[in-house]
Image: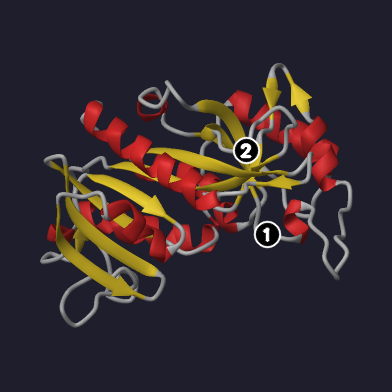
């Protein structure tokens, strides 16, 4: 086992991980994650029962059963910086020995399904669609602090986006888990998701402050290389896929499309779209025994 100092793996007085406030027994091997803490309850209202609940900052956790299957639902808040905390501590719950204060030699692999909301950046993606991200393009900086391995295809796409868009932070490209993604086919569309470090200027929006890169939305909309298009904006998927790869967990990201940025339109009933996505994902988790 690899020893870890107490200043690196910080625990609360009850022995739980620092930010999530969880113990290993509090989670299942199948995790559904959401951004908004209130959305945890939108998911678990469909459960047969709730066996555990913890609320700590923006991290809300409930573990229970849905049609007999044990599932943990967790919120992360917004942004890739929160996903960095979420993944490091979630991984510690299954791959860190809390008694010996060391990383286990034998690792456990979790299944993590992110469900969130998103805006399409292609005109033909309909509002109300459920989009499964094949690849994520990160425009944030968090992953640049980690040794994320990418293959030649991913680096080639990175180079092309970097040349075309020319942002101050180099984009990175990473694929989600194909083995998990393949369970979400019927009723879902596939796309390549842009993860932004903000909601307004980093996604090309302008209210009072004008974006430094006013052509960002247009450039991402037009980007195309060898059949690779960009489909939607959101704020976490690239970190999910990166930490999933580095830590050895299966991860996929599913977004309810609530806006079409090219048509400048927004869903008339976003809650109905979100609830429909939740029920569809839960059914698929049980049907596929994920």
User: Which one is in front in this view, the residue at disc 2 or the one at disc 1?
Assistant: 2
Q: Closer to the camera, 55 or 147?
A: 55
Quadrant position of residue 97:
bottom left
N-terminal of the pair, mark 2 or mark 1, is: 2
The answer to whether residue 124 is above or below residue 121 is above
Q: Quadrant of the C terminus?
A: top left
Is residue 22 in sight in this rendering?
no
Residue receiving disc 2: 127
C-beta proximity under 8 Å, tags 2 and 1: no
The answer to whether residue 205 is above or below residue 248 is below
Whole-angstrom CA distance, mark 2 to mark 1, is 18 Å
| Percent position of residue 100, x then y | 12, 64
How many residues crowd around disc 2 within 10 Å: few (fewer than 14), some, or many (20 or more)?
many
Give the residue displayed 41% in from the left and 28% down from the top: 181
Q: In this image, 149 relative to 55: left or right?
A: right
Give the residue displayed 69% in from the left and 17% down from the top: 227
Quadrant position of residue 108:
top left
């Amino acid at each position: 086992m690899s020893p870890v100092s107490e200043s690196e793996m910080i625990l609360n007085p009850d022995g739980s991980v620092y930010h999530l406030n969880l113990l290993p027994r509090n989670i299942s091997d199948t995790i559904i994650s959401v951004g908004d803490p209130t959305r945890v309850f939108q998911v678990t209202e469909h459960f047969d029962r709730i066996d555990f609940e913890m609320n700590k900052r923006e991290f809300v956790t409930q573990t229970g059963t849905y049609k007999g299957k044990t599932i943990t639902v967790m919120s992360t808040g917004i942004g890739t910086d929160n996903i960095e905390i979420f993944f490091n501590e979630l991984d510690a719950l299954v791959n860190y020995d809390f008694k010996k204060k060391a990383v286990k030699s034998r690792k456990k692999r979790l299944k993590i399904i992110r469900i969130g909301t998103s805006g399409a950046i292609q005109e033909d993606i309909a509002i109300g669609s459920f989009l499964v991200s094949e690849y994520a393009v990160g425009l944030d900086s968090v992953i640049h602090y980690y040794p994320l391995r990418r293959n030649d295809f991913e680096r080639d796409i990175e180079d092309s986006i970097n040349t075309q868009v020319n942002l101050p932070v180099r984009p990175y490209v990473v694929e989600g888990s194909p083995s998990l993604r393949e369970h979400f086919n019927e009723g879902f569309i596939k796309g390549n998701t842009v993860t932004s470090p903000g909601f307004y200027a980093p996604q090309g929006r302008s209210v009072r402050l004008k974006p430094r890169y006013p052509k960002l939305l247009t450039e991402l909309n037009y980007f195309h290389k060898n059949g690779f298009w960009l489909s939607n904006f959101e704020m976490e998927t690239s970190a999910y896929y990166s930490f999933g790869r580095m830590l050895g967990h299966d991860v996929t990201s599913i977004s309810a499309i609530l806006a079409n940025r090219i048509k400048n339109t927004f869903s008339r009933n976003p809650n109905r779209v979100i609830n429909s996505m939740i029920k569809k994902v839960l059914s698929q988790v049980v049907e596929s025994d994920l």
